[in-house]
Image (tube, grey):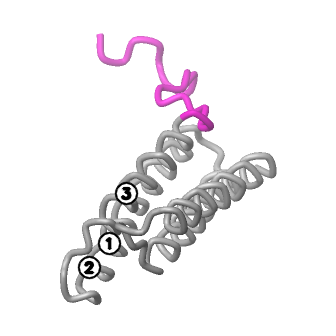
Amino acid sequence: MKTYSVRLWVLGCLLGLVTGLFDYLNAKIIVTADVYWGLVFLVSLFWALRYYVDRSQVANPNQWIRRAMISSMIRLMGVLTFLLISVLRQGKADIVFVITFGLYFILFLSFEMSEKRINLRPDSNDGPSKENA
């Protein structure tokens, strides 16, 4: 969990620095503060949900998988809610914010998938060997 947290926060800082550098060097495109707040939100959300899944004290592997799937749904709903609130607060759709937030979400999601090593079909020896046969 500690290496994941460090990698996640470093990735967030690097994306923030790249965005700031792009904003500084490019005069045509203006990056709003919502992009940076969205980046902080994504880093916090991904870290909190990973903490929620990894710190679970479950006896059955299926409960752990259920918790991972619930965290995926919470992640999607959180991102969509943040995007909706930000767009409604601005009054008009800022295409730079929507594109960068979507890109950040895809990057963090690919990072999460590369880091997560879960087995969605654990070997369960609790039941009979051929219960559906």
Q: Residue 73 got which mark?
A: 3
Disc 2 marks a residue whose amino acid type is: Val
Q: Earlier in the sequence, mark 1 or mark 3?
A: 3
Residue at horizontal 29 percent and vertical 10 percent from the top: 133
Q: Quadrant of residue 81?
A: bottom left
Q: CA distance from mark 2 to mark 1?
A: 6 Å
Q: Are marks 2 and 1 in contact (CB under 8 Å)?
A: yes
| Rendered view: 47 above or below 62 | below
Q: Which residues are magenta?
A: 114-133
Disc 3 marks a residue whose amino acid type is: Met
Say which element carries label 1.
helix
Magenta segment includes 38: no
Residue 27 lies left or right of residue 46; in this view the side is left
Label 2 sits on residue: 87
Say which element carries label 3.
helix
Q: Are marks 1 and 3 in contact (CB under 8 Å)?
A: no
Q: Nearer the viewer, residue 10 or 23?
A: 23
Q: Quadrant of residue 125?
A: top right
Say which element carries label 2.
helix
Q: Nearer the viewer, mark 1 or mark 3?
A: 1
Residue at horizontal 56 percent and vertical 45 percent from the top: 64
Label 1 sits on residue: 83
Disc 1 marks a residue whose amino acid type is: Leu
Q: CA distance from mark 1 to mark 3?
A: 15 Å
Q: Earlier in the sequence, mark 2 or mark 3?
A: 3
Q: How many marks?
A: 3
Neighbour tally class for label 1: few under 14, some 14-19, many 20 plus, Cα within 10 Å: some
Magenta segment includes 119: yes
